[in-house]
Image (cartoon, helix red, strand yellow):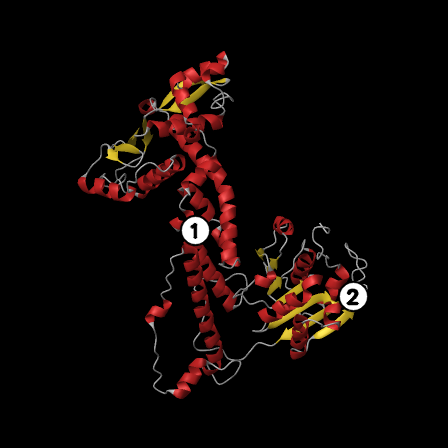
Amino acid sequence: MFAENPDLYPTPMRLQRKMFSKIDFRYVSTVLEPSAGRGDLLEGIEEQMKVTNRYRKTHDIDAIELDPNLISILKGKGKRVIHDNFLSFDSYKRYDCIIMNTPFSEGDKHLIKAIELQERGGQVVALINAETLKNPYSNTRKHLVRLLDKYNADVEFIQDGFTQADRKTSVEVALVYVSIPKIENESLIINNLKQDESYKVKSDLHSTQIVNGDFIKGIVENYNYEVKAGLRLIEEYEKLKPLMLKSFKESDSPVLELGLSNKDDEGSSLENGYIKQIRLKYWSALFSNDQFMGLFTSNLKRKYMEYVQELKDYDFSFYNIYTLRIQLNNEMIQGVEDTILNLFEEFSHKHYFDESSKNIHLYDGWKTNKSYKVNKKVIIPLNGYNRWWDGKYNPTSYEVMDKLKDMEKVFNYLDDGSTGEIDLVDTMKMAEHYGETKKIDLKYFYISLFKKGTCHIEFKNMDLLQKFNLFGSNKRGWLPPSYGKAPYEDMSKAEKDVIDNFEGKESYNKVMQNKGYFIQDTKELLKITS
Protein backbone atom coordinates (compact mmCIF):
# COMPACT_ATOMS: atom_id res chain seq x y z
CA MET A 1 0.00 0.00 0.00
CA PHE A 2 2.72 2.46 1.02
CA ALA A 3 4.99 1.51 -1.89
CA GLU A 4 2.20 2.31 -4.35
CA ASN A 5 1.35 5.59 -2.64
CA PRO A 6 4.44 7.54 -1.54
CA ASP A 7 2.29 10.35 -0.07
CA LEU A 8 0.27 8.04 2.21
CA TYR A 9 1.25 8.73 5.84
CA PRO A 10 -1.69 7.69 8.09
CA THR A 11 -2.20 10.20 10.91
CA PRO A 12 -1.22 8.74 14.32
CA MET A 13 -3.56 9.26 17.28
CA ARG A 14 -1.18 11.66 19.03
CA LEU A 15 -1.28 14.07 16.08
CA GLN A 16 -5.02 13.60 15.68
CA ARG A 17 -5.58 14.75 19.26
CA LYS A 18 -3.44 17.84 18.61
CA MET A 19 -5.47 18.63 15.50
CA PHE A 20 -8.82 18.18 17.26
CA SER A 21 -7.74 20.40 20.15
CA LYS A 22 -7.85 23.37 17.77
CA ILE A 23 -11.59 22.94 17.12
CA ASP A 24 -14.70 23.38 19.25
CA PHE A 25 -16.71 20.47 17.87
CA ARG A 26 -19.88 21.67 19.60
CA TYR A 27 -20.30 24.10 16.72
CA VAL A 28 -19.27 21.71 13.95
CA SER A 29 -21.89 19.78 11.98
CA THR A 30 -20.26 19.42 8.55
CA VAL A 31 -16.67 18.24 7.98
CA LEU A 32 -14.59 17.52 4.88
CA GLU A 33 -11.53 15.24 4.94
CA PRO A 34 -9.98 15.81 1.49
CA SER A 35 -7.07 13.34 1.61
CA ALA A 36 -8.72 10.46 3.41
CA GLY A 37 -6.19 7.71 2.69
CA ARG A 38 -7.30 4.51 4.35
CA GLY A 39 -9.54 6.38 6.80
CA ASP A 40 -7.46 6.79 9.99
CA LEU A 41 -8.10 10.53 10.43
CA LEU A 42 -11.66 10.15 9.13
CA GLU A 43 -12.48 7.62 11.85
CA GLY A 44 -10.91 9.88 14.46
CA ILE A 45 -13.15 12.76 13.32
CA GLU A 46 -16.23 10.54 13.50
CA GLU A 47 -15.38 9.42 17.01
CA GLN A 48 -14.72 13.00 18.15
CA MET A 49 -18.07 14.18 16.75
CA LYS A 50 -19.91 11.29 18.42
CA VAL A 51 -18.41 12.19 21.79
CA THR A 52 -19.06 15.93 21.43
CA ASN A 53 -22.48 15.78 19.75
CA ARG A 54 -24.15 12.74 21.27
CA TYR A 55 -27.64 14.09 20.59
CA ARG A 56 -27.11 13.87 16.83
CA LYS A 57 -28.14 10.61 15.18
CA THR A 58 -25.93 11.15 12.13
CA HIS A 59 -22.77 13.10 11.43
CA ASP A 60 -22.22 14.89 8.14
CA ILE A 61 -18.68 13.94 7.10
CA ASP A 62 -17.48 13.84 3.48
CA ALA A 63 -14.26 12.28 2.23
CA ILE A 64 -12.10 12.73 -0.87
CA GLU A 65 -9.40 10.31 -1.99
CA LEU A 66 -7.43 10.02 -5.24
CA ASP A 67 -6.20 6.41 -5.03
CA PRO A 68 -8.85 3.97 -6.43
CA ASN A 69 -7.66 1.18 -4.11
CA LEU A 70 -8.01 3.41 -1.07
CA ILE A 71 -11.43 4.56 -2.32
CA SER A 72 -12.52 0.91 -2.31
CA ILE A 73 -11.24 0.49 1.25
CA LEU A 74 -13.09 3.63 2.38
CA LYS A 75 -16.34 2.58 0.73
CA GLY A 76 -15.96 -0.86 2.26
CA LYS A 77 -15.87 0.85 5.65
CA GLY A 78 -19.06 2.72 4.80
CA LYS A 79 -17.40 6.12 4.32
CA ARG A 80 -18.93 8.73 2.02
CA VAL A 81 -16.41 9.37 -0.77
CA ILE A 82 -17.72 12.31 -2.82
CA HIS A 83 -14.83 13.00 -5.21
CA ASP A 84 -11.40 11.74 -6.22
CA ASN A 85 -9.02 14.67 -6.85
CA PHE A 86 -9.28 17.38 -4.18
CA LEU A 87 -7.56 19.93 -6.42
CA SER A 88 -10.39 19.62 -8.98
CA PHE A 89 -13.15 19.47 -6.34
CA ASP A 90 -15.83 22.13 -6.24
CA SER A 91 -19.10 22.20 -4.34
CA TYR A 92 -21.78 24.59 -3.19
CA LYS A 93 -21.92 22.75 0.11
CA ARG A 94 -20.49 24.68 3.04
CA TYR A 95 -18.26 22.92 5.54
CA ASP A 96 -17.82 24.10 9.09
CA CYS A 97 -14.36 22.58 9.08
CA ILE A 98 -11.86 20.99 6.70
CA ILE A 99 -9.51 18.63 8.53
CA MET A 100 -6.64 17.23 6.52
CA ASN A 101 -3.28 15.49 6.54
CA THR A 102 -2.00 16.88 3.24
CA PRO A 103 0.16 14.90 0.78
CA PHE A 104 3.75 15.89 1.58
CA SER A 105 4.56 16.46 -2.11
CA GLU A 106 1.63 18.84 -2.74
CA GLY A 107 0.84 20.22 0.68
CA ASP A 108 0.97 23.83 -0.50
CA LYS A 109 -1.61 23.29 -3.26
CA HIS A 110 -3.94 21.30 -0.98
CA LEU A 111 -3.85 23.85 1.83
CA ILE A 112 -4.46 26.74 -0.59
CA LYS A 113 -7.43 24.81 -2.03
CA ALA A 114 -8.86 24.24 1.46
CA ILE A 115 -8.54 27.94 2.36
CA GLU A 116 -10.20 28.94 -0.91
CA LEU A 117 -13.13 26.61 -0.19
CA GLN A 118 -13.57 28.26 3.21
CA GLU A 119 -13.38 31.86 1.99
CA ARG A 120 -17.09 32.24 2.74
CA GLY A 121 -16.33 31.36 6.35
CA GLY A 122 -15.09 28.26 8.15
CA GLN A 123 -12.11 26.52 9.73
CA VAL A 124 -9.15 24.60 8.32
CA VAL A 125 -6.90 22.29 10.33
CA ALA A 126 -4.03 20.81 8.36
CA LEU A 127 -0.81 18.87 8.74
CA ILE A 128 1.78 19.94 6.20
CA ASN A 129 5.47 19.33 5.58
CA ALA A 130 7.23 22.04 7.62
CA GLU A 131 9.68 22.64 4.77
CA THR A 132 6.77 23.98 2.69
CA LEU A 133 6.45 26.97 5.05
CA LYS A 134 10.08 27.33 6.11
CA ASN A 135 11.42 27.38 2.57
CA PRO A 136 8.85 29.19 0.37
CA TYR A 137 10.96 29.15 -2.78
CA SER A 138 8.11 28.66 -5.29
CA ASN A 139 5.29 31.03 -6.22
CA THR A 140 2.75 28.55 -4.85
CA ARG A 141 4.47 28.40 -1.47
CA LYS A 142 4.79 32.18 -1.36
CA HIS A 143 1.07 32.51 -2.10
CA LEU A 144 0.30 30.08 0.73
CA VAL A 145 2.42 32.05 3.21
CA ARG A 146 0.60 35.25 2.22
CA LEU A 147 -2.78 33.57 2.77
CA LEU A 148 -1.72 32.32 6.21
CA ASP A 149 -0.57 35.83 7.12
CA LYS A 150 -3.81 37.30 5.80
CA TYR A 151 -5.96 35.09 8.03
CA ASN A 152 -3.58 35.23 11.00
CA ALA A 153 -3.12 31.47 10.98
CA ASP A 154 -1.86 29.55 14.00
CA VAL A 155 1.18 27.43 13.02
CA GLU A 156 2.86 24.89 15.30
CA PHE A 157 5.97 23.01 14.14
CA ILE A 158 6.17 19.41 15.34
CA GLN A 159 9.32 17.32 15.33
CA ASP A 160 9.11 13.49 15.31
CA GLY A 161 5.34 13.55 14.80
CA PHE A 162 5.42 10.40 12.68
CA THR A 163 8.18 8.44 14.39
CA GLN A 164 5.61 6.23 16.16
CA ALA A 165 3.18 6.04 13.21
CA ASP A 166 2.28 3.02 11.06
CA ARG A 167 4.50 4.56 8.41
CA LYS A 168 7.43 6.17 10.14
CA THR A 169 9.30 9.28 9.05
CA SER A 170 11.44 11.86 10.81
CA VAL A 171 10.16 14.68 8.60
CA GLU A 172 9.17 17.76 10.59
CA VAL A 173 5.55 18.78 10.09
CA ALA A 174 3.56 21.95 10.70
CA LEU A 175 0.12 21.92 12.29
CA VAL A 176 -1.80 24.81 10.71
CA TYR A 177 -5.10 26.20 12.01
CA VAL A 178 -6.99 28.83 10.02
CA SER A 179 -10.29 30.35 11.12
CA ILE A 180 -11.94 32.44 8.43
CA PRO A 181 -14.81 34.62 9.65
CA LYS A 182 -18.08 34.53 7.77
CA ILE A 183 -18.21 37.38 5.27
CA GLU A 184 -20.91 39.93 6.04
CA ASN A 185 -21.92 41.56 2.76
CA GLU A 186 -24.47 44.30 2.30
CA SER A 187 -27.74 43.17 0.79
CA LEU A 188 -28.14 43.95 -2.89
CA ILE A 189 -31.86 44.32 -2.27
CA ILE A 190 -31.24 46.99 0.38
CA ASN A 191 -28.84 48.80 -1.95
CA ASN A 192 -31.44 48.77 -4.71
CA LEU A 193 -34.05 50.13 -2.32
CA LYS A 194 -31.70 53.00 -1.47
CA GLN A 195 -31.13 53.80 -5.12
CA ASP A 196 -34.74 53.49 -6.29
CA GLU A 197 -37.62 53.99 -3.88
CA SER A 198 -40.08 52.74 -6.47
CA TYR A 199 -38.29 49.36 -6.28
CA LYS A 200 -38.75 48.38 -9.89
CA VAL A 201 -37.44 44.90 -10.58
CA LYS A 202 -36.38 44.04 -14.10
CA SER A 203 -36.26 40.36 -14.92
CA ASP A 204 -35.36 38.45 -18.04
CA LEU A 205 -37.64 35.44 -18.13
CA HIS A 206 -35.42 33.73 -20.68
CA SER A 207 -32.40 33.84 -18.40
CA THR A 208 -33.67 30.80 -16.50
CA GLN A 209 -34.26 28.74 -19.61
CA ILE A 210 -31.02 26.82 -19.88
CA VAL A 211 -31.15 24.52 -22.89
CA ASN A 212 -28.26 22.33 -23.99
CA GLY A 213 -28.08 19.61 -26.61
CA ASP A 214 -26.06 17.31 -24.40
CA PHE A 215 -28.42 15.82 -21.83
CA ILE A 216 -25.98 15.34 -18.94
CA LYS A 217 -24.34 18.71 -19.46
CA GLY A 218 -27.71 20.42 -19.69
CA ILE A 219 -29.16 18.90 -16.53
CA VAL A 220 -25.97 19.64 -14.53
CA GLU A 221 -26.12 23.25 -15.71
CA ASN A 222 -29.77 23.41 -14.63
CA TYR A 223 -28.82 22.04 -11.22
CA ASN A 224 -26.01 24.56 -10.79
CA TYR A 225 -28.30 27.40 -11.80
CA GLU A 226 -31.02 26.33 -9.37
CA VAL A 227 -28.63 25.87 -6.45
CA LYS A 228 -27.03 29.26 -7.07
CA ALA A 229 -30.45 30.92 -7.21
CA GLY A 230 -31.59 29.30 -3.97
CA LEU A 231 -28.39 30.08 -2.12
CA ARG A 232 -28.60 33.68 -3.27
CA LEU A 233 -32.13 33.87 -1.86
CA ILE A 234 -31.03 32.39 1.47
CA GLU A 235 -28.06 34.75 1.60
CA GLU A 236 -30.26 37.79 0.98
CA TYR A 237 -32.80 36.57 3.52
CA GLU A 238 -30.12 36.26 6.21
CA LYS A 239 -29.07 39.85 5.55
CA LEU A 240 -32.65 41.11 5.73
CA LYS A 241 -33.61 39.28 8.93
CA PRO A 242 -32.56 42.13 11.28
CA LEU A 243 -35.13 44.35 9.55
CA MET A 244 -37.96 41.85 10.03
CA LEU A 245 -37.89 41.01 13.76
CA LYS A 246 -41.13 40.50 15.67
CA SER A 247 -40.06 43.19 18.13
CA PHE A 248 -37.21 45.67 18.61
CA LYS A 249 -35.26 43.09 20.60
CA GLU A 250 -32.28 41.89 18.64
CA SER A 251 -32.74 38.40 20.03
CA ASP A 252 -36.29 38.06 18.69
CA SER A 253 -37.19 35.91 15.69
CA PRO A 254 -38.16 37.37 12.31
CA VAL A 255 -41.75 37.90 11.20
CA LEU A 256 -40.95 36.35 7.85
CA GLU A 257 -39.35 32.90 8.01
CA LEU A 258 -37.55 31.04 5.26
CA GLY A 259 -37.49 27.27 5.58
CA LEU A 260 -37.52 23.93 3.77
CA SER A 261 -40.72 22.36 2.50
CA ASN A 262 -39.54 18.95 3.72
CA LYS A 263 -38.21 18.68 7.24
CA ASP A 264 -34.49 17.96 7.50
CA ASP A 265 -33.83 15.43 10.29
CA GLU A 266 -30.05 15.63 10.07
CA GLY A 267 -29.60 19.02 11.71
CA SER A 268 -28.31 20.61 8.50
CA SER A 269 -28.07 24.35 8.06
CA LEU A 270 -30.68 25.98 5.82
CA GLU A 271 -28.15 26.17 2.98
CA ASN A 272 -27.09 22.53 3.18
CA GLY A 273 -30.67 21.36 3.75
CA TYR A 274 -31.71 23.22 0.61
CA ILE A 275 -28.83 21.75 -1.40
CA LYS A 276 -29.74 18.22 -0.27
CA GLN A 277 -33.34 18.63 -1.37
CA ILE A 278 -32.33 20.06 -4.75
CA ARG A 279 -29.86 17.21 -5.17
CA LEU A 280 -32.66 14.75 -4.40
CA LYS A 281 -34.88 16.46 -6.98
CA TYR A 282 -32.25 16.17 -9.71
CA TRP A 283 -31.13 12.64 -8.84
CA SER A 284 -34.80 11.56 -8.92
CA ALA A 285 -35.27 13.27 -12.29
CA LEU A 286 -32.14 11.59 -13.65
CA PHE A 287 -33.34 8.16 -12.53
CA SER A 288 -36.69 8.81 -14.21
CA ASN A 289 -35.20 9.93 -17.51
CA ASP A 290 -35.18 7.49 -20.43
CA GLN A 291 -31.90 8.92 -21.75
CA PHE A 292 -30.18 7.77 -18.57
CA MET A 293 -32.30 4.75 -17.57
CA GLY A 294 -33.63 3.72 -20.98
CA LEU A 295 -32.25 0.17 -20.84
CA PHE A 296 -33.74 -0.60 -17.44
CA THR A 297 -36.96 -2.56 -17.06
CA SER A 298 -39.52 -1.43 -14.48
CA ASN A 299 -38.32 -3.84 -11.78
CA LEU A 300 -34.72 -2.62 -12.19
CA LYS A 301 -35.86 1.01 -12.14
CA ARG A 302 -37.78 0.42 -8.90
CA LYS A 303 -34.71 -1.18 -7.35
CA TYR A 304 -32.49 1.79 -8.15
CA MET A 305 -35.11 4.42 -7.29
CA GLU A 306 -34.84 3.14 -3.71
CA TYR A 307 -31.17 4.19 -3.85
CA VAL A 308 -32.00 7.81 -4.70
CA GLN A 309 -32.51 8.91 -1.08
CA GLU A 310 -28.84 8.19 -0.33
CA LEU A 311 -27.70 10.40 -3.21
CA LYS A 312 -28.84 13.62 -1.53
CA ASP A 313 -25.45 13.57 0.22
CA TYR A 314 -23.60 13.64 -3.12
CA ASP A 315 -23.22 16.65 -5.42
CA PHE A 316 -25.06 16.42 -8.73
CA SER A 317 -21.82 16.65 -10.69
CA PHE A 318 -20.31 15.13 -13.84
CA TYR A 319 -17.95 13.03 -11.71
CA ASN A 320 -20.70 11.55 -9.54
CA ILE A 321 -23.11 11.00 -12.45
CA TYR A 322 -20.56 9.09 -14.52
CA THR A 323 -19.26 7.18 -11.49
CA LEU A 324 -22.83 6.13 -10.77
CA ARG A 325 -23.45 5.20 -14.40
CA ILE A 326 -20.41 2.91 -14.41
CA GLN A 327 -21.68 1.27 -11.22
CA LEU A 328 -25.18 0.86 -12.68
CA ASN A 329 -23.83 -0.61 -15.91
CA ASN A 330 -21.85 -3.20 -13.98
CA GLU A 331 -24.88 -4.13 -11.89
CA MET A 332 -27.17 -4.05 -14.91
CA ILE A 333 -25.41 -7.00 -16.56
CA GLN A 334 -26.80 -9.31 -13.88
CA GLY A 335 -30.07 -7.39 -13.82
CA VAL A 336 -30.61 -7.82 -17.57
CA GLU A 337 -29.82 -11.51 -17.36
CA ASP A 338 -32.31 -11.95 -14.52
CA THR A 339 -34.96 -9.98 -16.45
CA ILE A 340 -34.64 -12.18 -19.57
CA LEU A 341 -34.69 -15.38 -17.51
CA ASN A 342 -37.71 -14.22 -15.49
CA LEU A 343 -39.68 -13.69 -18.71
CA PHE A 344 -38.42 -17.05 -20.00
CA GLU A 345 -39.84 -18.70 -16.89
CA GLU A 346 -43.03 -16.64 -16.96
CA PHE A 347 -43.79 -17.80 -20.50
CA SER A 348 -43.35 -21.41 -19.41
CA HIS A 349 -44.32 -23.04 -16.14
CA LYS A 350 -44.81 -19.96 -13.95
CA HIS A 351 -48.39 -19.54 -15.21
CA TYR A 352 -48.90 -23.17 -16.20
CA PHE A 353 -52.62 -23.84 -16.37
CA ASP A 354 -54.82 -25.61 -18.91
CA GLU A 355 -55.07 -22.73 -21.35
CA SER A 356 -51.35 -21.97 -21.32
CA SER A 357 -50.16 -25.57 -21.42
CA LYS A 358 -49.22 -25.06 -25.08
CA ASN A 359 -46.86 -22.20 -24.22
CA ILE A 360 -43.84 -24.49 -24.16
CA HIS A 361 -42.24 -27.42 -25.89
CA LEU A 362 -40.83 -29.93 -23.38
CA TYR A 363 -37.64 -31.76 -24.28
CA ASP A 364 -34.96 -33.92 -22.69
CA GLY A 365 -32.14 -31.54 -21.94
CA TRP A 366 -28.50 -32.08 -20.97
CA LYS A 367 -28.61 -34.37 -17.93
CA THR A 368 -32.22 -33.39 -17.18
CA ASN A 369 -35.69 -34.29 -18.44
CA LYS A 370 -37.32 -31.06 -17.23
CA SER A 371 -36.23 -28.75 -20.02
CA TYR A 372 -38.49 -26.56 -22.13
CA LYS A 373 -38.51 -23.87 -24.76
CA VAL A 374 -41.12 -21.23 -25.53
CA ASN A 375 -43.42 -21.77 -28.52
CA LYS A 376 -44.53 -19.28 -31.16
CA LYS A 377 -47.82 -18.65 -29.34
CA VAL A 378 -47.95 -17.91 -25.61
CA ILE A 379 -50.78 -17.15 -23.19
CA ILE A 380 -50.20 -15.16 -20.00
CA PRO A 381 -52.54 -13.67 -17.38
CA LEU A 382 -52.90 -9.97 -18.27
CA ASN A 383 -56.20 -8.15 -17.93
CA GLY A 384 -56.99 -5.51 -20.54
CA TYR A 385 -60.37 -4.74 -18.99
CA ASN A 386 -61.38 -2.80 -15.87
CA ARG A 387 -61.75 -5.35 -13.11
CA TRP A 388 -63.67 -3.69 -10.34
CA TRP A 389 -66.27 -1.41 -11.92
CA ASP A 390 -67.63 -1.30 -15.49
CA GLY A 391 -65.49 -3.99 -17.15
CA LYS A 392 -64.66 -1.51 -19.92
CA TYR A 393 -61.87 -2.30 -22.39
CA ASN A 394 -58.75 -0.58 -21.01
CA PRO A 395 -55.59 -1.75 -22.83
CA THR A 396 -53.64 1.37 -21.79
CA SER A 397 -53.91 0.69 -18.05
CA TYR A 398 -50.70 0.93 -16.03
CA GLU A 399 -50.63 -2.85 -15.48
CA VAL A 400 -50.92 -3.69 -19.19
CA MET A 401 -48.54 -0.99 -20.44
CA ASP A 402 -45.91 -1.75 -17.79
CA LYS A 403 -45.94 -5.44 -18.74
CA LEU A 404 -45.79 -4.80 -22.48
CA LYS A 405 -42.95 -2.29 -22.06
CA ASP A 406 -40.96 -4.81 -20.03
CA MET A 407 -41.55 -7.57 -22.59
CA GLU A 408 -40.53 -5.28 -25.43
CA LYS A 409 -37.42 -4.21 -23.53
CA VAL A 410 -36.34 -7.85 -23.07
CA PHE A 411 -36.47 -8.40 -26.82
CA ASN A 412 -34.75 -5.07 -27.41
CA TYR A 413 -31.82 -6.58 -25.49
CA LEU A 414 -31.86 -9.67 -27.72
CA ASP A 415 -32.57 -7.92 -31.03
CA ASP A 416 -29.68 -6.72 -33.19
CA GLY A 417 -31.48 -3.48 -34.03
CA SER A 418 -32.89 -4.77 -37.33
CA THR A 419 -36.54 -4.78 -36.22
CA GLY A 420 -38.48 -1.71 -37.30
CA GLU A 421 -39.90 0.55 -34.62
CA ILE A 422 -43.60 0.50 -33.73
CA ASP A 423 -44.60 3.01 -31.06
CA LEU A 424 -46.10 0.95 -28.25
CA VAL A 425 -47.96 3.78 -26.52
CA ASP A 426 -49.53 5.17 -29.71
CA THR A 427 -50.52 1.69 -30.91
CA MET A 428 -52.27 0.80 -27.65
CA LYS A 429 -54.05 4.17 -27.56
CA MET A 430 -55.35 3.54 -31.07
CA ALA A 431 -56.45 0.02 -30.08
CA GLU A 432 -58.38 1.47 -27.16
CA HIS A 433 -59.96 4.19 -29.31
CA TYR A 434 -61.17 1.75 -32.00
CA GLY A 435 -61.93 -1.14 -29.63
CA GLU A 436 -59.34 -3.36 -31.28
CA THR A 437 -58.75 -6.45 -29.11
CA LYS A 438 -57.35 -9.10 -31.53
CA LYS A 439 -53.91 -9.32 -33.13
CA ILE A 440 -52.72 -5.86 -32.11
CA ASP A 441 -49.50 -5.35 -34.07
CA LEU A 442 -46.56 -4.48 -31.78
CA LYS A 443 -42.82 -4.42 -32.44
CA TYR A 444 -41.98 -8.06 -31.77
CA PHE A 445 -45.36 -9.79 -31.47
CA TYR A 446 -49.11 -9.61 -31.94
CA ILE A 447 -51.28 -9.56 -28.83
CA SER A 448 -54.95 -10.35 -28.24
CA LEU A 449 -56.69 -9.36 -25.00
CA PHE A 450 -59.65 -11.33 -23.62
CA LYS A 451 -62.25 -10.48 -20.98
CA LYS A 452 -61.34 -13.52 -18.90
CA GLY A 453 -58.07 -11.74 -18.09
CA THR A 454 -55.63 -13.41 -20.47
CA CYS A 455 -53.32 -12.11 -23.17
CA HIS A 456 -52.43 -14.21 -26.23
CA ILE A 457 -49.00 -13.45 -27.67
CA GLU A 458 -47.83 -14.51 -31.13
CA PHE A 459 -44.19 -13.92 -31.99
CA LYS A 460 -43.34 -12.45 -35.39
CA ASN A 461 -39.62 -13.24 -35.69
CA MET A 462 -38.79 -16.93 -35.26
CA ASP A 463 -35.04 -16.28 -35.25
CA LEU A 464 -35.44 -13.84 -32.35
CA LEU A 465 -37.62 -16.36 -30.50
CA GLN A 466 -34.94 -18.98 -31.10
CA LYS A 467 -32.34 -16.59 -29.65
CA PHE A 468 -34.57 -16.07 -26.60
CA ASN A 469 -34.87 -19.84 -26.10
CA LEU A 470 -31.14 -20.33 -26.57
CA PHE A 471 -30.33 -17.67 -23.99
CA GLY A 472 -32.70 -19.21 -21.43
CA SER A 473 -31.68 -22.80 -22.12
CA ASN A 474 -27.95 -22.03 -22.05
CA LYS A 475 -28.21 -20.12 -18.77
CA ARG A 476 -30.20 -23.00 -17.26
CA GLY A 477 -27.56 -25.52 -18.39
CA TRP A 478 -30.02 -27.51 -20.49
CA LEU A 479 -27.88 -27.59 -23.64
CA PRO A 480 -24.60 -29.49 -24.06
CA PRO A 481 -21.42 -27.53 -23.25
CA SER A 482 -20.40 -28.06 -26.88
CA TYR A 483 -23.49 -26.24 -28.18
CA GLY A 484 -22.49 -23.63 -30.73
CA LYS A 485 -18.86 -24.77 -30.62
CA ALA A 486 -18.82 -28.18 -32.32
CA PRO A 487 -20.39 -29.20 -35.65
CA TYR A 488 -23.35 -31.56 -35.32
CA GLU A 489 -21.39 -34.42 -36.92
CA ASP A 490 -18.64 -34.18 -34.28
CA MET A 491 -21.03 -34.48 -31.32
CA SER A 492 -21.55 -37.55 -29.19
CA LYS A 493 -24.83 -39.49 -29.36
CA ALA A 494 -25.97 -37.96 -26.04
CA GLU A 495 -25.28 -34.45 -27.34
CA LYS A 496 -27.07 -35.15 -30.63
CA ASP A 497 -30.09 -36.49 -28.75
CA VAL A 498 -30.43 -33.18 -26.86
CA ILE A 499 -30.05 -31.17 -30.11
CA ASP A 500 -32.64 -33.34 -31.86
CA ASN A 501 -35.08 -32.91 -28.97
CA PHE A 502 -34.46 -29.16 -28.72
CA GLU A 503 -34.52 -28.10 -32.39
CA GLY A 504 -33.15 -30.68 -34.85
CA LYS A 505 -30.01 -30.88 -36.97
CA GLU A 506 -31.13 -28.37 -39.63
CA SER A 507 -31.94 -25.66 -37.08
CA TYR A 508 -28.65 -26.29 -35.25
CA ASN A 509 -26.66 -25.91 -38.48
CA LYS A 510 -28.43 -22.58 -39.05
CA VAL A 511 -27.30 -21.43 -35.59
CA MET A 512 -23.73 -22.53 -36.32
CA GLN A 513 -23.72 -20.50 -39.55
CA ASN A 514 -24.75 -17.34 -37.67
CA LYS A 515 -23.34 -17.76 -34.17
CA GLY A 516 -22.66 -14.03 -33.86
CA TYR A 517 -26.40 -13.41 -33.84
CA PHE A 518 -27.80 -16.43 -32.00
CA ILE A 519 -25.23 -16.90 -29.23
CA GLN A 520 -24.23 -13.84 -27.20
CA ASP A 521 -23.46 -13.19 -23.56
CA THR A 522 -25.16 -10.42 -21.57
CA LYS A 523 -22.33 -7.91 -22.02
CA GLU A 524 -22.56 -8.24 -25.80
CA LEU A 525 -26.33 -7.74 -25.69
CA LEU A 526 -25.90 -4.50 -23.75
CA LYS A 527 -23.32 -3.20 -26.24
CA ILE A 528 -25.72 -3.80 -29.13
CA THR A 529 -28.67 -2.24 -27.31
CA SER A 530 -26.78 0.87 -26.22
Element carrying mark 1: helix
Q: Is residue 121 above or below residue 99?
A: below
- In the picture of the structure, the residue carrying the numbered disc 1 is 287
Left or right: residue 13 compared with residue 403 = right
Q: Amino acid at mark 1?
A: Phe
Residue 173 picture location, percent across and down: 76, 66
Residue 514 picture location, percent across and down: 41, 27
**Mark 1 or mark 2, which has the lower sequence index?**
2
Label number found at residue 484: none
Seen as rendered, the residue at the extreme top is 493
Q: Amino acid at mark 2?
A: Glu
Q: Is residue 203 above or below residue 282?
A: below
Label number found at residue 172: 2
Nearest the viewer among 121 and 246 is: 121
What number of labels is visible? 2
Question: Within 10 Å of the Cα at label 1, are there few (<14), some (14-19), or many (20+) other Cα atoms?
Answer: some
